[in-house]
Image (tube, rainbow, N blue to C red):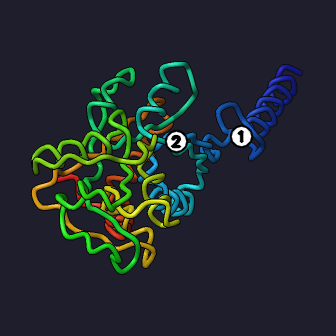
Amino acid sequence: MRRALTLVVASLLTTIAACSGSSGPTAGSHKTNEPVKLTIFAASSLTNAFSAEAAAFAQKTGDQTTFSFAGSQELVAQLRQGAPADVVATADQPTMLRVPHGSQATVFARNRLVMITAHGNPKNVAGLADLSRSDLVVVLAAPTVPAGKYAAQALSAANVTAHPKSLEDNVRSVLTKVQLGEADAGIVYASDAQSAKNGVTAIAIPHAPIVSYPALAVRPAGQAFVDFLLSAQGQQILARYGFLPPR
C-alpha cells in the first residue's frame, strides 16, 4: 500500500513539473521591444535632413518619430514651459545650455553660413558689402535666432551694416522669402541653400563662423535617435543634406 502511494505521489510531481515546463506564457516572457514613439524638437534648418534620418531610423529600429521644427530659441522656450520631448537638437550650443541638463548634449553636425539671392543672382550680389546697398531688399534671421546671431557676427567682422526689411524667427523663413521674391538677398546655412536646389543662388561668406549642432536626449528613450545621428549611416545622411561632420 505504501509503495502504491509513493508511485501516485511521484506521478503527480512529474505531471506538475511537465506543466510548469510547457511552452505557454510565463512571468517575464512578455515582449519588451515594442516600437517606441519619439517626439523630437529640432531647429528649422534640420527639417529636410531629420525627415530623412527619421525614415532610416524607423527602418532600422521600428521606432516612430514626431517632429516639431522651429527656431532653436522657440523650441527651448517650449521645453522650459514643460512641453514634452524625447530629443532636442539646436543650431548652436549657447541655446542648448538653456535646456535643463543641456550641458550633456553632443555635437552631431556642423554647418556654415552663405548668402543667398534669387536664382541666377539678378542683382549681382558679390559679397557681404553688397548687403548694405539701398537697392537691395535684405532679410535676416532675428538676433535671438542662432542664424541671426551668426549673421550679425559675419557682418560685424566685415564692417558691413545691413538694413533688413524684416527679421525672421527662424532661418527657413529667410530662405522662403528669397525664394518667393519677397527679398533680394539673405543669409542662411549652406544646408538651407542646398535644400532649395535651383530656387536660389548661394554665395560663399569667407571666414564666416562654423556652426555646431548639439543634440540632447531629454528622456532616456531618445538616446537611441541621438546615437543614430552619430552613427556612420546617420552621418552619411547629414552629409547628403549639406552638413559638415561634427569634427
Q: Residue at x 48, y 30 (%)?
A: 219
- The numbered disc on residue 40 is 2
* In this view, 23 is above or below 29: below
* In this view, 52 is above or below 169: below
Amino acid at the residue labelled 2: Ile
* In this view, 144 is above or below 202: above
Q: Calculate the distance from the C-alpha at mark 1 to the C-alpha at mark 2.
A: 44 Å
Where residue 51 sits: x, y (%)? Answer: 52, 59
Where residue 109 sits: x, y (%)? Answer: 28, 53
Residue at label 1?
Answer: 21
Taking 37 as reference, is 123 left or right?
left
**Residue ranking furthest to the front:** 134
Q: Can you say which quadrant of the picture contains the N terminus? A: top right
Taking 15 as reference, is 149 left or right?
left
Count of labels in the image: 2
Taking 54 as reference, is 171 left or right?
left
Crowding at dot 2, Cα within 10 Å, few <14 / some 14-19 / many 20+, comes out as many
Between residues 65 and 169, which one lies in front from this camera angle? 169
Where residue 48 sits: x, y (%)? Answer: 48, 61
Between residues 165 and 99, which one lies in front from this camera angle? 165
Crowding at dot 1, Cα within 10 Å, few <14 / some 14-19 / many 20+, comes out as few
Looking at the rendered structure, the secondary structure element under dot 2 is strand
Looking at the rendered structure, the secondary structure element under dot 1 is loop
Q: Residue at x 49, y 60 (%)?
A: 182
Between residues 21 and 45, which one lies in front from this camera angle? 45
* In this view, 213 is above or below 195: above
* Location of residue 145 (image quadrant): top left
Nearer the N terminus, badge 1 or badge 2? 1
Between residues 210 and 147, which one lies in front from this camera angle? 147
Q: Which dot, 1 or 2, sits closer to the camera? A: 2
Amino acid at the residue labelled 1: Gly
Q: Residue at x 18, y 42 (%)?
A: 153
